[in-house]
Image: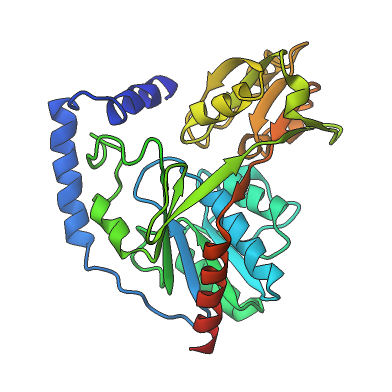
Amino acid sequence: MKTLHNWLQTIWYGDGLPPWYLRILSKLYGAYQNRLSAEAELTREPKPVIVVGNVVAGGSGKTPLVIYLAELVMREGLNVAVIGRIYKGNANGPLRVNENTGVQQVGDEPVLLYKRLSCPVVVSKDRSKAIDFIIKKIDCDIIISDDGLQHRQLPRAVEIGVMDGLRKLGNGHLLPAGPLREPAKRLNRCQWLVSKGGGASGNLVNMQLETRYAVNLQSGERKLLSDFSGQQVSAIAGIGHPQSFFESLQSYGLIVEAYPFPDHYHYTTGELLQLDGPKPLLMTEKDAVKCHNMKLINAWYVPLQIELPETFNQAFIARCRALLEY
C-alpha cells in the first residue's frame, strides 16, 4: 500500500504525463461522475448544514478547519453538532461518538473531533442518517459536515471548499490519473474556498496552519517544538501530505528521520515500538488517536492550530445567523 501510495503521489504531483492506462480509467471515472452529476443544489434541512470538503483525494486540512469553525460558532453562543463518515471502521451508525468509542469502530478523524471539541460528534456510513439522528435527538442550531462535498444526497446550505495552496490540484486529472474526485470547476459552486497556504482574493481565504508544541502520549507533558531544536527525532505521518508535517518540524530546527505512511494508516504496535527509543518519536494528532494504547514511552503528538482572517470569521458568523433567521 505504501509503495502504491508513493507511486501515485509521484504521478499526481509530478510534471510528466500520467500513464495511458490511468488516463483511460480517468475518462471512465469522469463519465461516471457526469452520470451522477445532476447538480446537487443547496437544500435546506430543519437545521442548516455546512459542508466542508474538497475535490482532491487526500488531506487538505478539512478536519482542522471543521474544528476551527465549530469552535467559532460555539464562541458566538450557538449550539453546533459535527457529522462525519465512518471510514475504515466496523460500525455502521448513526453513532454518537463518546469516550469509549474506538478508532476500530469509526476511524481516526471522528475520534480526533470528539477529543478536540466540546460538542456532539455523530458519524454514520451515510451522513444523511447522521443528520436525521441529530435532528431527532440533539438540540443544536448548526450542523457542520466533515467532508461530504461529493455526497450528493447530503443536504447543505453552505459549501466551503478546501485546497492545498502549494500543491493545488496536482496535475489536474481525475482519479486515478490525477488526484481530483471531481473537475476543478466544482469549486466554483462553493461559497468560500479556503486555501492552506498561498494567497487570498475574492472568496479565496488563506488558512495558516501552525505547529507550536508537542504532547507526550503517556504523561501529557507539553514541550515547545523549539525545545527539540538540534535533536535527532523520528517522525511518522499517516496523512494526505506527510511531507508538510516533516517540513513543519524541520522549520523548528529538528533533525528529522521521516517515515511517511498513507492517509488513515493503521499502525501496528510492532512498527512503532521499533521507533520508540532514545530518539523522540513525533507524530500528528490524527496518528496519535490510533497509538494511545501502545504504551510508547518517548512518543509525542503535535496538535495543529489554524488561523483565518477576521474578515472571514465575521462573514461566516453573519452567514450562520442569516441561515437561522431564514
**Total count of labels:** 0
Whole-percent x, y for residue 180 in the image: 29, 44
Whole-percent x, y for residue 100 in the image: 75, 51
Q: Residue at x 64, y 53 (%)?
A: 113
Q: Nearer the viewer, residue 212 or 64?
A: 212
Q: Nearer the viewer, residue 36 or 9?
A: 9
Q: Residue at x 52, y 37 (%)?
A: 264
Residue 21: tell me if it is visible: yes
Whole-percent x, y for residue 256 in the image: 61, 16
Quadrant assignment, res 189: bottom left
**Type of colouring:** rainbow
Q: Residue furthest bottom?
A: 326
Q: Residue at x 58, y 47 (%)?
A: 109
Q: From the viewer's perspective, is 114 left or right of 149?
A: right
Q: Nearer the viewer, residue 314 or 164?
A: 314
Quadrant assignment, res 286: top right
Q: Quadrant of the N terminus?
A: top left
Q: Is residue 281 above or below residue 83?
A: above
Q: Residue at x 81, y 22 (%)?
A: 297
Q: From the viewer's perspective, is 110 left or right of 180?
A: right
Whole-percent x, y for residue 216 in the image: 80, 31
Residue 106: tell me if it is visible: no
Q: From the viewer's perspective, is 220 left or right of 281?
A: right
